[in-house]
């Protein structure tokens, strides 16, 4: 399996556990809490597989960036969070940064 695909899956699971934190209500709701913990563990395991081939200085920021971007977009689309010009600009800068890290990687 392509190592970048593994990293993408890890990032998507980071989005899942970050969103799960909201729905677990500080780990007071059982099933959302279970989902959150399982998504976190799976995300970290996939990240650990990715860093076997991708330098940690590239893999970790990409993993974190996917999670941050996806969680922010979820908040905008589903939770009615702010779509201010500045917020959208900085999210676009995050996308550009993630693409730059991928394009500059030797893997």
Image (spheres, grey):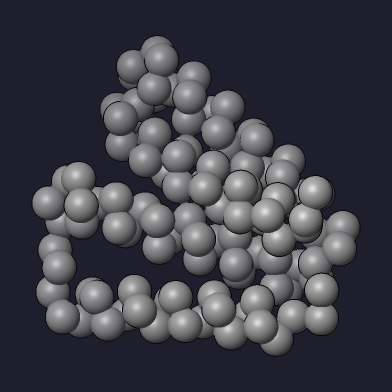
Q: In this view, does 28 lie to the left or right of 103?
A: left
Residue 98: % across, % down: 54, 75
Residue 25: % across, % down: 29, 27
Residue 52: % across, % down: 87, 58
Tell me which corner region of the image, top left, top right, bottom left or bottom right, holds residue 51. Answer: bottom right
Name the residue nearer the viewer: 50 or 61.
50
Q: In this view, does 19 lie above or below 7?
A: above
Q: Is residue 73 above or below residue 104?
A: above
The residue at the point 70 percent across, 66 percent down is 59
Quadrant holding the C terminus: bottom right
Q: In this view, does 57 lie above or below 89?
A: above
Name the residue nearer the viewer: 8 or 38.
8
Tell me which corner region of the image, top left, top right, bottom left or bottom right, holds residue 54. Answer: bottom right
Q: Is residue 33 above or below residue 13?
A: above
The residue at the point 60 percent across, 67 percent down is 62
Residue 70: % across, % down: 40, 56
In the image, farthest residue toward the front: 1
The residue at the point 45 percent across, 40 percent down is 16
Q: In this view, does 91 lie to the left or right of 63?
A: left
In the image, farthest residue toward the right: 52
The residue at the point 36 percent across, 53 percent down is 71
Q: How many labels does the image show?
A: 0
């Amino acid at each position: 399996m392509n190592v970048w695909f593994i990293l993408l899956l890890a990032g998507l699971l980071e989005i899942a556990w970050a969103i799960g934190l909201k729905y677990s209500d500080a780990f007071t709701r059982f099933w959302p809490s279970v989902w959150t913990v399982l998504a976190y563990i799976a995300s970290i395991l996939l990240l650990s597989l990715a860093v076997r081939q991708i330098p940690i200085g590239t893999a970790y920021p990409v993993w974190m960036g996917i999670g941050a971007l996806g969680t922010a977009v979820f908040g905008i689309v589903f939770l009615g969070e702010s779509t201010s010009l500045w917020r959208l600009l900085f999210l676009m800068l995050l996308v550009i940064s993630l693409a730059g890290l991928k394009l500059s990687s030797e893997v």
